[in-house]
Amino acid sequence: MSDKNLDVTIIGGGAAGLNAALVLGRARRKVLVIDEERPRNRVTRESHGFLTQDGISPSEFRRTAKEQILKYPSVSFVSGIVDGVTGVDGDFRVHTGSGDAFRSRKVLFATGMKDVVPDIEGLAEVYGTSAFVCPFCDGWELRDKKVCVIGTNEKVFHLVKVLTGWTKHITLLTNGMDILTADQLLELEQHQVPANQDTIKCIESVNGFVKKITLRTDEAIECEGIFFTPNLVQATSIPESLGCKMTNDGPFAAIAADQMGRTNVKGIFSAGDASTTFHQLIYAASSGAIAAVTIQLELNEEEWDGFRK
Ligand SMILES: Cc1cc2nc3c(=O)[nH]c(=O)nc-3n(C[C@H](O)[C@H](O)[C@H](O)COP(=O)(O)OP(=O)(O)OC[C@H]3O[C@@H](n4cnc5c(N)ncnc54)[C@H](O)[C@@H]3O)c2cc1C
């Protein structure tokens, strides 16, 4: 057991966890960030759409953030995986895979989501360089290019529709899955988006840049970029095991947190991708900042009341 008595343990050091650490460090709170260091966007060379940071590499974004946060001496970082949280509000224990346990008053889950990438030969080689998941993040880079959209679930029709804002040269590949309705097939035809329902044999690329996609029938489709719809799962099931409610109304289960980052379990907070269906760095960072302010105000109230009693 670590003898550290922390105010807050932040699990996850992506945009959400880092912004929370910055706000809490500036509020002079004793904070520990425990991070497995596998943020969702680690596969990309550049990240986009974050004011003043457009085009920055994900690793540089986090390196700069950490450098700035470490100016605040009450914040520290540990690299590792949290595999359990026990205790109650005011006295949690956060356990790591290496056998450490850290005592803290509040816990923030900023653990993000994991992408389940379809098992297609050649996709791993292009993922993050010319194959992406979100047009708002990487659509500009593929504007007016020949793009194949690979569907793994029902979200694919929506993705095609949204993508037409960036390019009109779209081919939809369902990779052998029955995920389009008759009405959707008709609409795609009306919008001149070819939809091919064959299984994909492989993706060919050079240095991460896709050149063509070959189908099981040996038909080859030339393309310059790919978008696909990954299935998303929570990076950790610990919040659920603690009794945190999950939302079931979106395309995947998110941790149910109010707009201030509070879950239904007292003392447990959540921010970033893990607790929303809107996945952008700037949103993750802002929700981390909001959760941090909420935590600080709660700690402050408890101290004020404790002193008064
Ligand atoms: C390919 C791709 C490209 C993207 N490009 C962009 C872009 O250009 N612009 C943009 O705005 N958004 C982009 N996004 C979305 C963006 O990556 C996410 O919205 C953002 O990373 C969410 O931040 P987060 O802090 O919630 O989670 P993450 O960044 O995923 O960070 C979560 C952290 O928690 C850690 N963690 C998880 N479980 C544990 C545990 N049990 N113990 C310890 N640590 C743990 C993880 O290892 C990780 O380091 C992209 C996403 C993908 C998949």
Image (cartoon, rainbow, N blue to C red):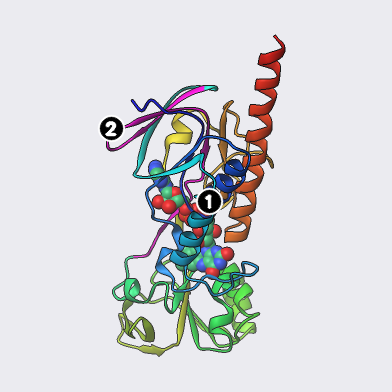
Q: Mark 1 — residue?
A: 69
- The residue depicted at 60 percent of the width and 34 percent of the height is 263
Given this view, does label 2 or label 1 mark the residue nearer the observer?
1
Residue nearest the observer in this picture, 102 or 73:
73
Please tell me whether residue 114 is drawn above or below residue 300 in the rendered image: below
Image coordinates for residue 300, horizontal then vertical, percent: 67, 27
Q: What kind of residue is marked 2?
A: Gly
Give 29 or 14, whichever is nearer the viewer. 29
Residue at 43 percent across and 64 percent down: it is: 59
Can you tell me whether the CB of the residue at mark 2 lies under 8 Å from the nearest atom of ligand 1? no
Badge count: 2
Q: Quadrant of residue 3?
A: top left
| Most common secondary structure along the magenta stretch | strand
Label 1 is placed on what type of residue? Answer: Ile
Find numbered disc 1 in the image and state the secondary structure of the residue it sits on: helix
Residue 169, image x, y percentages: 55, 88
* Mark 2 secondary-structure assignment: loop
Query: At 42% from the left edge and 64% from the top edge, which residue is drawn?
Result: 42
Q: Residue at x 43, y 79 (%)?
A: 130
Above or below, 264 relative to 108: above
Residue at the spot of label 2:
99
Q: CA distance from mark 2 to mark 1?
A: 26 Å
Q: Which residues are magenta?
A: 91-118
